[in-house]
Amino acid sequence: MTSIDKRAATTVIPPTAPLRGRVAPPGSKSITNRALLLAALANGTSRLSGALKSDDTRYMAEALREMGVAVAEPDETSFTVTGDGKLRAPKAPLFLGNAGTATRFLTAAVASVDGTVVVDGDHHMRKRPIGPLIKALRSLGVDAYAPTDCPPVTINGKGRMPGGRVEIDAGLSSQYVSALLMAAPLSAEPVEVALVGKEIGARGYVDLTLAAMAAFGASAKQTGDGEWRVQPGGYRATDYLIEPDASAATYLWAAETLTGGAIDLGVPSNAFTQPDAQALSVIRSFPNLPTTIDGSQMQDAVPTLAVLAAFNATPVRFTGIANLRVKECDRVSALATGLAAIRPGLGREDGDDLVVASDPSLAGQTLPARIDTRADHRIAMSFALAGLKIGGITILDPDCAAKTYPGYWKALESLGVRFA
């Protein structure tokens, strides 16, 4: 078995037998970063178990520490968070790498700080839009600005989140809505959050937000289609169990399907409440995937499904995925380019759709291809699946998987996959 840690590239060697074994997916990134923030905003000590320890969650934890919250890590899957319900202005800008959840969530939450906070990230994050959230915060009276409509963001807080009604355009990301909802209980008066239009990226993640808020004692109710009313009162500390990451599970479900194996995730599929769990029913239809797959409500699963579609019986068109262009990279482009590197014409962009010209005969061939991951963890992990069936698939910058799944490559090794 060859470890691929800290290597610039790795080539997947197609296994000669079905993948079998047990792999426990890491904790949900989406839920971990919500729970970390809510625990930090609570008065008392919260214990978060089943948590994800990855680049994204470490950026969030460190930012909270810089704002006066005690965040301990007693073991590899737990955080202990102690706060008094308030965040303090940090001594320096908060650096959040390319962690979209941490950046969007904290941009709203630090409006409650008495002082100035700068929220910033790496060069990738500085290309990811945050303008709709800034516009919404300013409409509430928050002194917030982002000259490029991307980070860095500067917020001059006055010690409390303003209340009132706020409208938000969530067409690019549901994270804008979640950010406002989680900050709302810090106001002295009720906050009404309303969508501008009905479009919202991955609406199921708003349900995750509301469930986490309720667990930490906040009162938020949906009052209409795309409208929520949040009561003041802050949060109370609690012990909170974080479910496994459904997006990470999609790679294992697909690996099982592609190789005819049996991978035990240690948790029943119906235990997942995250939107990406919807991908399982699609994966189970392989090699007869739907001719059109709407990825709007399971966006992080689209890379997995797109690579799986390369081996499908018939071509597949992915729709509703325009938002993938503003993720860690332009994923529509990255997927089309990666698939075309395996075989010209295998993947192509059609407007904001992705069209995969499926070909079951690809399996068993050697088609040397170097996959440019564009520093995107999901591009790296999904194209590794192609290497389970095709020889010569080389993943560039495999370590970028650490953003959300640090143990991914070792998990594949434990199932019998080898790398060169």
Image (cartoon, grey):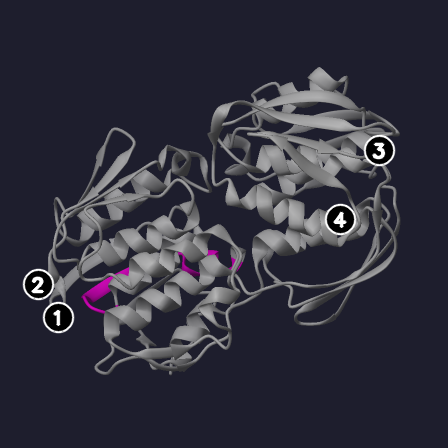
The quadrant of the image that shows the N terminus is bottom left
SS at mark 1 in the image: loop
> Disc 2 versus disc 4: distance between alpha carbons?
49 Å
Q: Position of residue 112 (x, y in %)?
A: 82, 32
Instruction: Please report contact status of discs 2 and 3: CB closer than 8 Å, yes or no.
Output: no
> Disc 2 versus disc 3: distance between alpha carbons?
58 Å
372 sits left or right of 122 in the view: left
Residue bearing mark 1: 364
Amino acid residing under circle 1: Gly
Q: Earlier in the sequence, mark 4 or mark 3?
A: 4
Of the residues tagged 2 and 1, which is closer to the observer?
A: 2
> Disc 4 versus disc 1: distance between alpha carbons?
48 Å
Q: Position of residue 31 (x, y in %)?
A: 62, 54
* Residue in view at x 61 percent, y 38 percent: 121
* Residue in view at x 68 percent, y 32 percent: 180
Q: Earlier in the sequence, mark 3 or mark 1?
A: 3
Amino acid residing under circle 3: Val
SS at mark 3 in the image: loop
> Disc 2 versus disc 1: distance between alpha carbons?
7 Å
Q: Which residues are magenta?
A: 388-402
- Give the answer, above or below, for where 90 lies relative to 77: above
Residue bearing mark 4: 38
Residue bearing mark 2: 361
